[in-house]
Image (tube, grey):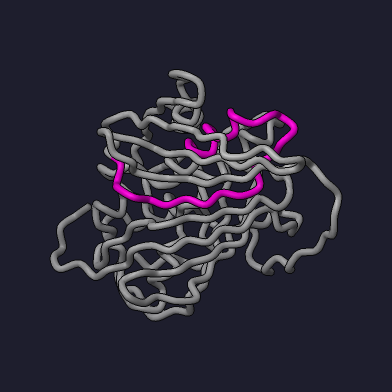
Amino acid sequence: MDKTQALLDILNLELIDRNLYRAQNLSIGTKRVFGGQVLAQAAIAAIHSVDDDRHLHSLHGYFILPGDVEKPIVYRVTETRDGGSFSTRRVTAVQNGKDIFILASSFQLKQDGLDHQIQAPNVTKPDQLASDYEIAKKFKDMVPDYLIRMIQEKPIEFKPVEMPDFLTPIKNEPFQHVWFKYKGSLGDDINTHKKILAYASDYNLLLTALRPHEVTVHDVQLASLDHAMWFHRDFRVDEWLLYALDSPSASNARGFTRGNIFDLQGRLVASVAQEGLVRKRRDKKEN
């Protein structure tokens, strides 16, 4: 199946009852459900519960248990509040009778206000870069199988500005930049673009926390713990976006990472923050 369509399919939720939905999973090469998928599906469930004139502007989620990619997930929406300008929703994701993820989300009427932003980084443009998949294929005889599975061809194309070092990582500053876009064409519905961006936002964050430490993803256990996201301006995720990532801190087996997302015109369209488990493995078992 075409993976771009497969992604859209799993982000279309099945209505079970009022504010109750069921969703399927899309594997990214591991037995666990990808965190960005759960985040996006929970956001969609919340979007379905508000009027069309209220627009999603922030998400705050906690990953409680790993999801099983072989079983569907049920999403339950609580309509917490509808005010004059803002609406708040809480979403709980359930699998095997247990909560695996909780989300708080906020929606706002379109309103005029102050407008400023930080400047976009001046980095190499995407048309001059190779994708992570192309890079992995080029060095496939040297890259471990588990990395090939993780960097499999995806519905989102990623082009790293800084060349990834799969085998012999060196100490780097805790910063990286990655261009990305959805490979297909999408319509003009901003909610479609927001759910795809929420899905893509979980990629590359915790990898930024590894850059100063001379380790690969096979040397550590990584898992998202919480994820926050803010939508600033309208955008298109089927056009190139730049993820400017940094990791201010790692301690107590946790890594803290942030990301600002810019479009090709340099507009800041969204921001992300995440903390995740970053713990050295005691063995070398594959994921």
- Specify whether residue 204 is painted magenta: no
Residue plotted at (22% across, 52% down):
287
Span colored in magenta: 41-67
Say whether residue 20 is visible.
yes
Left or right of 32? Residue 12 is right
Left or right of 195? Residue 14 is left
Image coordinates of residue 64 in percent, x first then y, are 34, 50
Nearest the viewer among 254 and 104 is 104
How many numbered marks are there?
0
Say whether residue 238 is visible.
no
Residue plotted at (25% across, 52% down):
146
Image coordinates of residue 274 in percent, x first then y, are 47, 61
Residue plotted at (47% across, 43% down):
39
Nearest the viewer among 238 and 193 is 193
Q: Is residue 214 above or below residue 183?
A: below
Residue plotted at (40% across, 78% down):
212
- Specify whether residue 64 is painted magenta: yes
Image coordinates of residue 244 in percent, x first then y, are 59, 64
Looking at the rendered image, the quarter that the N terminus falls into is top left
Q: Is residue 8 above or below residue 98?
A: above
Image coordinates of residue 108 in percent, x first then y, are 72, 43
The quarter holding residue 235 reads top right
Q: Is residue 220 above or below residue 31?
A: below
Nearest the viewer among 180 and 58 is 58
Q: Is residue 284 above or below residue 110?
A: below
The quarter holding residue 186 reads top right
